[in-house]
Amino acid sequence: MRTVQGELNKTLKKFLRLDKVKTVGAGRTDAGVHARAQVVHFDVSEDVWSKIKDPMYKFRRLLPPDIQVRKVAIAHPDFDARYSALTRRYSYTIADAKDGIDPLNSRYVLDYRKKLDHHDMNKASKELLGLNDFYAFCKSREGSTTIRNLIKFNWTRKSDYVICEVIADAFCYSMVRGLVAAIIQVGEGKKDINWPKEVMLKRKKITDLNVVSAKALVLEEVTYPHPSKLKEQYEITRRTRKLED
């Protein structure tokens, strides 16, 4: 399968003239998810990197047109794109017009065609904020925790589009898509405002909760602490989380 990471690794191997390059991204997104602000690091010796006079030109020339590198810099020794991150911010866009969406937006928007009440969606989303176990909304992976700190989960309406902004310290696999799927049921009137929180607290997978399409999900921003706090943040992120933290 063609991936952004695969294309990036292939390009780096070409202009660094190395047999292998391992990149590490800020987040491992589901297949089909887009990113405006993915952050990546990789390790390379100083003598190899010093020979590259204009890396941005190399990226522009060698990367396919649907992938763009916006900035290149030598990172702090303690920096880790994944484990040093403080927060990730995603957006999810839904079109609820009965006659569908503009075809030009079809790659990036969920075509729902059922009117959604974004006010009720906001009320339900607010109940999920804080440090919680989001097991019910995630695809489980053995040995990984589903405890996350959900910092912001907000919905706004722009004409026929309902747009979600969600921020957390990290997300487990398919968490955003699971959360959005639950909140949609509230917005459509199928479930009451307290239902998503009840699902979360029960920590039980339910048959009528499915993840929504990946195509409308976009990684918008990743934030990092001051360089002096990078090592500390790395250790916090690597620590097994507990609800009493």
Image: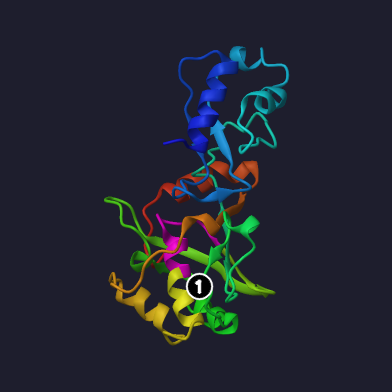
Q: Amino acid at mark 1?
A: Leu
* In the rendered image, the vertical position of residue 124 relative to residue 25, given as above or below: below
Picture quarter with the C terminus: bottom left
Q: Residue at x 42, y 65 (%)?
A: 178
- Judging depth in this view, the residue of 151 and 156 nearest the camera is 156
Look at the image and tell me whether residue 135 can be seen. yes
Where is residue 225 shown, x and y percent of the image? 62, 48
* In the rendered image, the vertical position of residue 196 relative to residue 192, given as above or below: above
Magenta highlight range: 167-180
Q: Residue at x 51, y 14 (%)?
A: 18
Q: Which residue is mark 1?
A: 129
Picture quarter with the N terminus: top left
Quadrant position of residue 105: bottom right
Q: Residue at x 46, y 15 (%)?
A: 19
Does residue 170 show up magenta in the picture? yes
Where is residue 83 shown, x and y percent of the image? 49, 44
- Judging depth in this view, the residue of 136 and 94 nearest the camera is 94
Where is residue 192 shown, x and y percent of the image? 44, 87
Secondary structure at badge 1 equals loop
Does residue 232 show up magenta in the picture? no
* In the rendered image, the vertical position of residue 22 relative to residue 230, given as above or below: above
* In the rendered image, the vertical position of residue 182 relative to residue 235, given as above or below: below
